[in-house]
Image (tube, grey):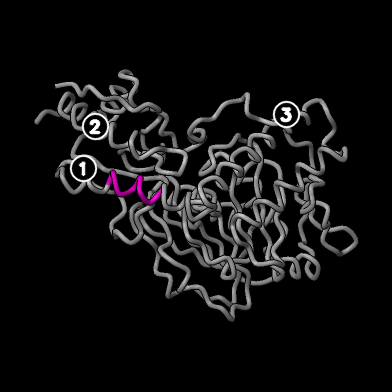
Amino acid sequence: MKPQIRPENPNFSSGPCSKRPGYSLKQLKIDTLGRSHRSALGKDRLAKVCSETAELLGLPEAYRVGVVPASDTGAVEMAMWSLLGERAVDVLAWESFGKGWITDITTQLKLKNTRCFEADYGKLPDFSEVDFNRDVVFTWNGTTAGVKVPDGDWIADDREGLTICDATSAVFAMDIPWEKLDVITFSWQKVLGGEGAHGMLILSPRAVARLESYTPVWPLPKIFRMTKNGKLNEGIFKGSTINTPSMLCVADYLDALAWVKSLGGVAGTIKKSEDNLAVIAKFVAENNWIDFLARDPATNSNTSICLTLKAEPEQVKAIVSLLAEEGVAYDIGAYRDAPAGIRIWGGATVEASDLEALMPWMTWAYKQVVGN
């Protein structure tokens, strides 16, 4: 029979992700609207974005945090185009976005001395092959594959190259060893449920030293330039953005950070996300028609939770459509380049109670489409 209890919030998209519980536009502090982002007020709010992010994440003191254009993609591109080329590169990919960085490095930047380590959806490459005398580019969490890096033990402490990490669906949801990473990027619309178009770029002192000692042979667009007269443009990391940001989105992000504080900090958001994964893991263990795309449980993402079904691709699409028609789950189809399946966002803005309510609907929809 059709379940009676519905999720209070059926928004399970993996980006843009659900807003935080209790979210309301009326709660945003919007006195910056209509004001210049270069005003004292605008700069103060943007500086708070940087400083409060660093404080909540517990970043090492010398790490810098900046707001940059074009979401996480813009932040990754900015890092690669500004930093790569000084030495050989190892790039790792096990899903769509990592493969996109391979294309940029080999086809757009045309870096010849590049090694690519790839794995199929559901698996990780062999990290033991990585050479940390080279620059290393990788994602922490495969948003389209549901496979995450379990820890940072494989990253050398005495590395000569830089580690450049796309962590957009991991920051605020996973325990990340910051000292192992030299460049970290993420976007507001993932774990914090913020608005799009803005990226966050975190640099270690080693990354700053590279910027100040190395100039790429290719031209850099204005929005990628992080140095002036051979020195880091510190203003970018203190509220003076390269281009005009949306101050409404800034207000939204600061609201999300205040919510993180109310949960006890990043430990609270990590716990919520892990609790969400536990709800789905229990359901998977109890049903033989559904499984995780990740092959190794230790690599199972607790944000972009990717599932495979014993069903044909068209049947999977029908299940996704049926759940949307019933108003119990929106935007849960697998990413277009990934194997047919379901992808449910498990970040901290999603409540475990809503996932618990969704699970019986998953069974109902499967039986409606595929049968017993």
Q: Distance from label 2 to label 3 (Cα)?
A: 40 Å
Point out the stretch of residues depicted in magenta: 273-280
| Identity of the residue drawn at 78% across and 31% down | 32
Closest to the camera, between mark 1 and mark 3, is 3
Image quadrant in which you'd find residue 227: bottom right
- From this view, report whether residue 227 is shown above or below residue 314: below
Query: Is residue 330 something that shows in the picture?
Result: no
Q: Which badge, 2 or 3, is on the more N-terminal residue? A: 3
Left or right: residue 369 versus residue 77 is left
At label 3, the amino acid type is Ile
At label 2, the amino acid type is Met
- The spot of residue 107 in percent (x, y) is 59, 53
- From this view, report whether residue 93 is shown above or below residue 290: below
Q: Distance from label 1 to label 3 (Cα)?
A: 45 Å
Q: Looking at the rendering, in which quadrant would you find the N terminus?
A: top left
Q: Which badge, 1 or 3, is on the more N-terminal residue? A: 3
In reply to whether residue 178 is colored magenta, the answer given is no
Q: Secondary structure at mark 2?
A: helix
Identify the residue position indicated by label 1 in the image. 290
Residue placed furthest toward the top: 325
Query: Is residue 198 something that shows in the picture?
Result: yes
Identify the residue position indicated by label 2 in the image. 362
Query: Residues at badges 2 and 1 in contact (C-beta under 8 Å)?
Result: yes
| Identity of the residue drawn at 63% across and 78% down | 160
Left or right: residue 264 versus residue 291 is right
Residue placed furthest toward the right: 229
- From this view, report whether residue 161 is shown above or below residue 120: below
Prevailing secondary structure of the magenta residues: helix
Q: Residues within 10 Å of mark 1 (few under 14, many from 20)?
A: many
- The spot of residue 37 in percent (x, y) is 82, 36
